[in-house]
Each structure stands twice: as C-alpha cells, then as structure tokens.
Image (tube, rainbow, N blue to C red):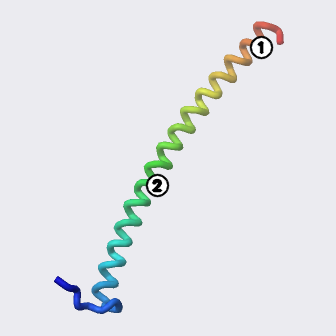
Amino acid sequence: MTDERGTNDLERKIEDLTKQKEYLQRQCRKAAKAILEAEIDKARLMKDLNRLQEEYDNYKLMTGV
C-alpha cells in the first residue's frame, strides 16, 4: 500500500500536526507530573530541614555552644 499523496498535501500536514500535538501534550503531562513530584519532595525536605534546625538550636542551648 503506497501513499500517493504528496508531501504538501493538507490532509497529511493535518495528520502530522495532530500527531505532533498529541506527542507534545503527553510530554507536557509527564513534565507537569515531574514538577509536582519535585514540589512535594521540596516541601518534605524543607520540613525535615526545619525540624533538624530546631533540634540543632535546642542542642546548642542545652550544651551552651
């Protein structure tokens, strides 16, 4: 089965652009998911950092450092 349409055929261009749009949408969804996961990790790390800073400050108070 050969495709007899030329490379400038509008239907082919529409199909190609539709495929490209769908691909880019999938990539954007993946990127959005990765960003959300990174933000969750950042919030968790900030919480741990604040907790450790408080523990360190308490340690300094207790030891007089």
Apparent side of residue 48 relative to residue 54 in the rendered image (left or right): left
Q: Residue at x 46, y 53 (%)?
A: 32
Q: Which residue is drawn at 59% across and 27% down?
A: 48
The quadrant where residue 8 appears: bottom left
Residue 50 % position (x, y): 65, 27
Read off the residue under disc 2: 31
Q: Which residue lies furthest to the top in this view?
A: 63
Please name whichever residue, 45 or 9, is drawn nearer the observer in this view of the structure. Answer: 9
Residue 53, compared with residue 10, is above or below; it is above
Q: Which quadrant, please, contains the N terminus?
A: bottom left
Apparent side of residue 56 relative to residue 26 in the rendered image (left or right): right
Few, some or many residues within 10 Å of mark 1 (<14, 14–19, 20+)? few
Read off the residue under disc 1: 60
Q: Residue at x 34, y 89 (%)?
A: 7
Q: Which quadrant, please, contains the C terminus?
A: top right
First along the sequence among labels 2 and 1: 2
